[in-house]
Amino acid sequence: MEGSSGMNVDIDYEAVTSALLGIDHSTTSLSQALSDAWSDVYRAATPGANLYEFNLAGWSFLFDFASESDAPQWDRTLAGWGLSAPGVRPRDTTYQRGYPSPNGRAKAPLDKGHLIPHQVGGDLGQNIFPQDRDLNRGWSEEGKRYRALEREIGRSSGTFFFCRLVYVDETDFPGWVELGVLRGAVLHVERFRNRFD
């Protein structure tokens, strides 16, 4: 897997988390270790990265505010993470309908995907990204695995999880989506293809 500069963007999640989870089971330490790993890999592959980590409605986000530094890449979210909070929530359909449509940016139809799934409390704004419709809706084989992980995240409150977007060019249309969920002391991570151009 390569990013826009041709640099490898894989992360050895086992190496990042194994020593940490063996001695420190706090999700705060895990969050910091992951954020540091994502930032290091992204900065190495993306000159001019202007990264901000912030909290919004109980979720943490890592965001490249590239327009502030005149970098060539678009402003874009790199990752979102936190503890699941399952529950029924009404969708803000007016806001979501008014959010720019990603359609027309790929041959296949796209959805307005969510890093933090709506079913566990994910909201809008920096949480939305262009997502392959078959992946988002569970219509493809990868999509079935993706949706199964989202359902696992949504089954119980307090489950630590993350969604990381891996970019392959300067746009905000990720080539890959990673979902990770903490299962006891093991961080299970899967990567899903999001672009087919």
Image (cartoon, helix red, strand yellow):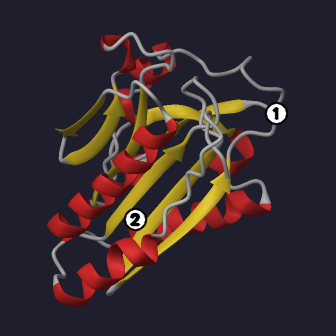
Q: CA distance from mark 2 to mark 1?
A: 31 Å
Question: For the residue labelled by badge 2, is the local secondary structure a helix, a strand or a loop?
Answer: helix
Mark 1, Cα crowd under 10 Å, few <14 / some 14-19 / many 20+, is: few
Which is nearer the eye, 44 or 116?
44
Residue 19's x, y, as percent?
A: 28, 84
Residue name at image x 51 percent, y 33 percent? 129
At label 2, the amino acid type is: Gly
Q: Residue at x 45, y 65 (%)?
A: 180
Residue matched to label 2: 154
Q: In the rendered image, which residue does mark 1 sit on?
A: 197
- Chain-order first, disc 2 or disc 1: 2
Q: Quadrant of residue 16?
A: bottom left
- Label 2: how many Cα within 10 Å (few below 14, some 14–19, many 20+): many
Mark 1: amino acid: Asp
Residue at image coords 32%, 45%? 89
Res. 124 visible in picture = no
Q: Position of residue 23 (x, y in %)?
A: 18, 88
Q: Could you tell me which quadrant the C terminus lies in?
A: top right
Q: Position of residue 64 (x, y in %)?
A: 36, 29
User: Is residue 2 visible in the rendered structure shown here?
Assistant: yes
Q: Nearer the viewer, residue 149 or 184?
A: 184
**Front one among 72 and 64:** 72
Where is residue 8 shown, x and y percent of the image? 60, 51
Location of residue 112 with respect to 149 vertically, above or below: above
Q: Residue at x 61, y 34 (%)?
A: 5
